[in-house]
Structure formats: C-alpha cells, structure tokens
Amino acid sequence: MTALAVLGAGSWGTALAVQLARNGHAVRLWGRDVAAMQAAGENQKYLPGCPFPSGLKVVPELGHALAGADDVLVVVPSHAFRELLECLAPQWPAGARLAWATKGLELDSGLLPHQVAADVFGDSLALAVVSGPTFAAEVGRGLPAGVTVASGDDDFAADMAGYLHGGDFRAYTASDIAGVEVGGAVKNVMAIATGVADGMGLGANTRAALITRGLREMMRLGEALGGQRETLMGLAGLGDLVLTCTDDQSRNRRFGLALGEGLDPQAARARIDQVVEGMQAADAVWRVAQRLKVEMPITEQVYRVIYQGASAADAVLALRSEGPKPESE
C-alpha cells in the first residue's frame, strides 16, 4: 500500500483521490470544508454522489497530509500553484516526488507548471504532470477514462500511472511534460471560443472548424515551448480539446455559451459560479504567444472579448475576415 497525499479538494482533486483509494492506496486529501466531508463521507459541494473509499482520509492540516507520504499530487488552480508549492517546500517529506494535475500557465511570468516547480524546488526533485480528457464527476462515478502521465523520470511516470491505473481508468506514460501542459492550458481557451460560437447559434460546422484550427494553435505554441506534436495529438492535447469544447460539463464551454448569448464576462462568470480556468488562461496564453511571436488568432479574439471589451460578434467578424492561406499555417 502506497501512502499518497492529494492536495486540493475541489472536484478534480477529490475525484483523483477517490480513484487512488479505489486502487488500494492510503490517500490523505487536504482541502477546505474538512468537517463537512468527514461527516458526509463524500465531497457534497464539489463531487456529490461519490462516496469516499475506506482508504481515503480527509485532513485539515497540510503537515498531516504530507507526513509519511511516498509521493504528492497537487490539484489546485494554476493561480494558486506557486503559493502552495512555496508552503510545501520547507516541510517536504523525505524521498517523496511531486506530481500535479493543475492546468494552465502562471499569469505573471507565463511559466508552465513544471517551470514553476523547478523554480521553487530546484532540479533535484522528480516531477510529473497528470492530464487528459477527464470530467471529475465521471471519474468519481468510476466511468471509463484515460489520462497521460508525463515525467522526465521514467520510473516516476510509471509509478504515478500505476497508482491511477485500475478498473476502467487507464493511465499512459510520456516524457513530454511541456507538450502535456500546453495542451491543458490552451484547450480551456478553445472551449470558450466554441462555447461563444454555439451560444451565437453558428452551427456544428463552425464548432468543428474552431476545434481543428484550435488544435493548430495548440501545436504552434506547444512546439515554441519545447513540446512535441505527437503529444498534442494524444489524450492531453486533442483528447482534452475535444472533450472540453463539446460537452456542457465544461465550465469553460458554459462560460463561452453565456458570452455568445450576450452576457458580459463578469455576468457570465457569475452564472458559472466556479473557477473558470480559461479566463486566466486566455490572458496568459495570449501574452506568451505575443512574446514568442506565435500566431494564435482564436486565442487573440477570446482575449479581446474577455479583456478588451470586444463583443462576441466583433470577434467572430475578425475571424471571418481572415484571408485564405495554407492549412498547415
């Protein structure tokens, strides 16, 4: 039995903790509302209807979660990622390795999560990222799903995949951390774009075109940041892109739908009433694309709608006005 700490008790952190405990591991889940979760035996706020396996314990103190952990999995929003790592560093359990299922770029610096982790911990700690086309509610219920676990340390990738792999949940290994992380960030921006188009009633043809051209943008940025095209054609790239752009379980897609229906960004965010990662991702991805001179027209229009007051109709018109060019560009 492996002792694992899962830090972050939102819907996705809870679902991963449940999956790890189902596989027979001793899991400590750290987050807020611990008393309510302990009393209910489930996370009624973020993952209702998914009871905790016996091996899952919810703890209120970070030090308690870390004590004796063989490995640690961080599952917090990207804007809280560095702050949490800086809290972890002074009390890091000896021999433990660090994985995360956080998606997105750091807003101020434009760094990918593995770069933030290296900035905090240095180069001595083994790192891994978990990503893929997964809605927390479905994982929590034990429905079939698949993820990619990427690490520069082959043993850690294999171990983390082994912790997660079981039942109808499949985990695949890779070494391309940057590619996996770019896929997880850009797909949220594209989900907003497809939501806008569907909210405006532009049809299935438009949705398919946006997903396909969104994949092209994802590949361009991924390669500029050291990722591989093959990775972005896999679960963490194309797979996550299709899922997030086409199903209303996606908060980012629902946010885009609200924008397409005419709500302003603040009202659309209030309708969702949860973190919409794509809002920050649109800012961070656009900034990085500008710095690296990577052409990302869909991302640019999402950025304009959220941060520059452009209407959804203005954004669609700008994309429609592009002239013909080779599809490979």
Image (cartoon, grey):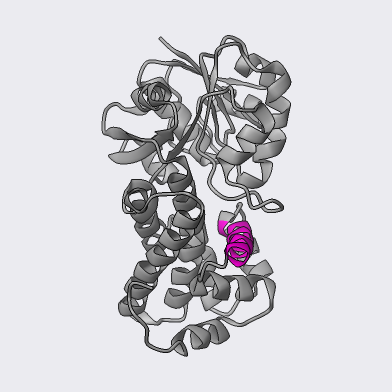
| Circle count | 0
- Against 257, is 164 above or below? above
Give the residue displayed 51% in from the left and 63% down from the top: 189
Q: In this view, does 176 lie above or below 37?
A: below
Q: In this view, does 302 lie to the left or right of 174?
A: right
State the image coordinates of residue 184 (x, y, percent, origin top left). Answer: 47, 50
Residue depicted at x 64% and y 71%:
306
Q: Nearer the viewer, residue 228 or 113?
A: 228
Image quadrant containing the N terminus: top left
- Quadrant placement of the C terminus: bottom left
Residue 218 visible (yes or no)? yes
Q: Residue at x 49, y 73 (%)?
A: 298
Residue 323 in the image, given as x and y percentages of width and height: 42, 89
Who is closer to the viewer here, 219 or 192?
A: 219
Q: Does the magenta stretch include residue 1?
A: no
Query: With 85 as the anchor, is 316 left or right in this view?
Result: left
State which region is magenta: 278-292
Residue 156: percent from the left, percent from the top? 42, 23
Reply above or below: 45 against 268. above
Residue 231 at x, y percent in the picture: 35, 48
Q: Can I make out residue 61 in this image?
A: no
Quarter holding residue 209: bottom left
Magenta stretch: includes residue 287: yes
The main secondary structure of the magenta stretch is helix
